[in-house]
Image: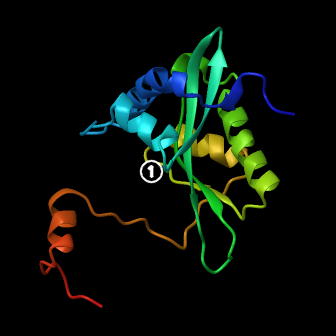
Amino acid sequence: MPHPGVRRARASDVPAMLGLVHELAEYERATRFELTSELLHEALFGPAPILSAHVAEADGELVGIALWYLTFPSYIGRPGIYLEDLYVRPTRRGSGLGKALLSALAAECVRQGYSRLQWSVLNWNTSAIDFYNSLGATPDDDQTHFGLAGDALTALAHGAPGGTGV
């Protein structure tokens, strides 16, 4: 049964959601924060949405968020959900809202016939790792996540040499 405080995000939630993402960025020690209300609204509710969200409410305010999008594991042939961000305000942690947000995403997977629910966690975030372990989640030791951003992304986009190649 769904948690009464967890629901899909609405356009009117965007300002509060932006605040929660900003809190998460501070918690994760992010060095850049470029997200605006306009960018978040476009990603969630624009003509071609690329992001979905669930929110957690308590006492009439948003206190938690789960931002996610679909992936397509080609070898399985069915979409999956990738949880980009999960955040519950520190004052509300331990209340069951984090689990309820993940449960809502798991239910979405089951309802839609999706193949999996995946996410990443910062190696230093032991409280999150303990929480995920308590739910029965397991780390994927077969993969290491890579990424390109900033100058490295631009250099590769322009064909600049950057390594040995494959």
* Residue 105: % across, % down: 69, 45
* Residue 43: % across, % down: 45, 43
Residue labelled with disc 1: 123
Measuring 43% from the left and 45% from the top, which residue is drawn there? 124
Considering the image in quadrants, where does the N terminus appear?
top right
Q: From what the image shows, is residue 137 above or below residue 66?
A: below
* Residue 11: % across, % down: 53, 28
Locate residue 73 relative to residue 78 in the image: left or right.
left
Measuring 64% from the left and 25% from the top, which residue is drawn there? 56
- Depth check: 161 or 91 in front? 161
Locate residue 152 relative to residue 41 in the image: left or right.
left
- Depth check: 49 or 127 in front? 49
* Residue 58: % across, % down: 65, 14
Measuring 25% from the left and 58% from the top, which residue is drawn there? 149
Can residue 74 be seen by looking at this rendering? yes
- Depth check: 33 or 78 in front? 78
| Type of amino acid under label 1 | Asn
Locate residue 73 relative to residue 106 in the image: left or right.
left
Judged from this view, the residue extending furthest toward the bottom is 166
**Please, what secondary structure does the residue beneath circle 1 have?**
loop
Q: From what the image shows, is residue 83 above or below residue 40?
A: below
Can residue 96 be seen by looking at this rendering? no
Considering the image in quadrants, where does the C terminus appear?
bottom left
Q: Counting other residues with Cα less than 10 Å from the Cα at mark 1, is it few (<14), some (14-19), or many (20 or more)?
A: few
Judged from this view, the residue extending furthest toward the front is 47
Q: From what the image shows, is residue 77 above or below residue 14?
A: below
